[in-house]
Amino acid sequence: MIRLLYSFLFHLAMPLVWLRLLWRSRRQPEYLQHIGERHGHYPPSAGGPLIWLHAVSVGETRAAEPLVELLLQRYPEHRMLLTHMTPTGRAAGRELVQRHPDRLHQAYLPYDLPAACGRFLDHYRPRVGLLMETEIWPNLIAAAKRRGLPMALVNARLSTRSQHGYARLAGLSQPALAALDAIAAQTEADAERLRAVGARQTVVCGNLKFDVTPPPERLRLGAHWRQALGHRQVWLAASTREGEEALLLDAFARLPHRHLLLLVPRHPQRFAAVAELIADRQLASCRRSSGSLPDEETRVWLGDSMGEMPAYYALAEIALIGGTLLPFGGQNLIEAAACGCPVLLGPHTFNFAQASVDAIACGAARRVANADEAVATAAELLQQPLQLASMRAAASRFSQAHRGATERTAALIDSLMAPRAAG
């Protein structure tokens, strides 16, 4: 009855959903593309066995890369379907598709309405369904259960804040979690929180993000920038969220003109707004999209590009991880460590709680309280090359020490695939 009420309310909310799509399309016209897919209508697809993996946006898509590669290798007779909910996630997945154009396909996951979910599953008929991180859709999971489709939540995480939210909606979330055939949690703390809100088949497999290898061409690009900039020191504010850029720019504007701030907003639709923030503070700047490198007078380099974060990390001496100064929960610090870049973390890291604790403990990261302290600490560390070198080495060790989640997760998927193959 609760799921029925949820579906009814979802139907009533659809006009608002459409308005939201229209609003977001003002900055990203891609939101109005492939509209039929969001309601379960898809073009004809090739037959044959199919593995389906859902990665909602950019972070989940990049984290899924090593798992996708391993599954394509392990199941050569299978194709894979990669679904998303955002245009940026779909764009990030397109790089993977280009590597495997005959075996890897993309689509939007439909909204969690019973008929749309049924059309999606009946159209593609996957052998197994894999949901990345925190994607719990009650109607989708129920439709899969009715069709005998094994479903797993992989690279699963659940913060304390999200646990409380799930507990408030226990009548809806508990049956969905209990219906999953397997859950591969990132940490034991995540597993405990998931069990507390109704999950059953839960094991700890680690974080897939540790197995993501930075593209060598991106690292070479960062090294090229480093050489071109010469003696100029660079610190990076990576994947910043709304409200954080203003705080950082105000603090940075008070510094003497020595260091270069590389500022990379999380969402591309905000690039223009952040450029205006820089101009309002009369800070000399240039944009990555212009194709020109900063000169001696440039104070802020706006990283308004997609897919180049490894190059930015390879260039920078140290990086502040966005989403940690304000209560967004933090973006991915593991990618920075994989590139050998030490990091600063604000107080809000609940999205990567265990990774943050471990990175600080091993010397790969430092905690700062606010934007002023972040700017001051970055400036201080830029004057301490030996300390930065020690943090850089710790970041590389931290990244290497936590690898292996992909193989453990694939073994769990093997156990779900085996009964279907035997059948």
Image (cartoon, helix red, strand yellow):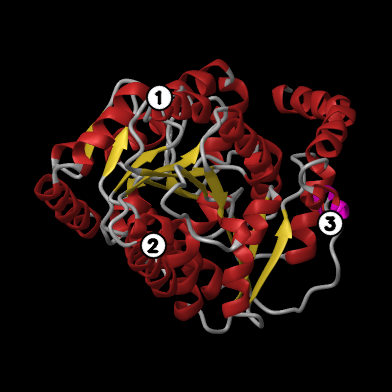
Amino acid bearing label 1: Ala
For the residues labelled 1 and 3, the Cα–Cα distance comes to: 43 Å
Report the residue at 72% width, 51% height from top: 109
Q: Which dot marks residue 268? A: none
Query: Magenta stretch: residue 36 in it?
Result: yes
User: Are the residues flagged by discs 1 and 2 in contact, CB closer than 8 Å?
Assistant: no
Label 2: few (<14), some (14–19) or many (≥20) C-alpha neighbours in 10 Å: many
Query: Magenta stretch: residue 329 in it?
Result: no
Q: Which residues are magenta?
A: 33-39
Secondary structure category for the residue under label 3: loop
Residue 351, percent across and down? 41, 34
Please name which of the two marks, 1 or 3, marks the residue nearer to the observer: 1
Nearest to N terminus: mark 1 or mark 3 = 3
Q: Which dot marks residue 212? A: 2
Nearest to N terminus: mark 1 or mark 2 = 2
Label 3: few (<14), some (14–19) or many (≥20) C-alpha neighbours in 10 Å: some
Which residue is at the front of the view, 185 or 19? 19
Q: Quadrant of residue 8?
A: top right
Amino acid bearing label 2: Val
Residue 119, percent across and down? 82, 54
Q: Quadrant of residue 171?
A: top right
Residue 323, percent across and down? 46, 32
Which residue is at the front of the view, 332 or 160? 332
Nearest to N terminus: mark 2 or mark 3 = 3
Secondary structure category for the residue under label 1: helix
User: Which quadrant holds the N terminus?
Assistant: top right
Task: Report which residue position mark 1 lands on.
Answer: 251
Residue 358 visible in the snapshot: no
User: Are the residues flagged by discs 1 and 3 in contact, CB closer than 8 Å?
Assistant: no
Task: Report which residue position mark 3 lands on.
Answer: 34
Residue 344 visible in the snapshot: yes
For the residues labelled 2 and 3, the Cα–Cα distance comes to: 29 Å
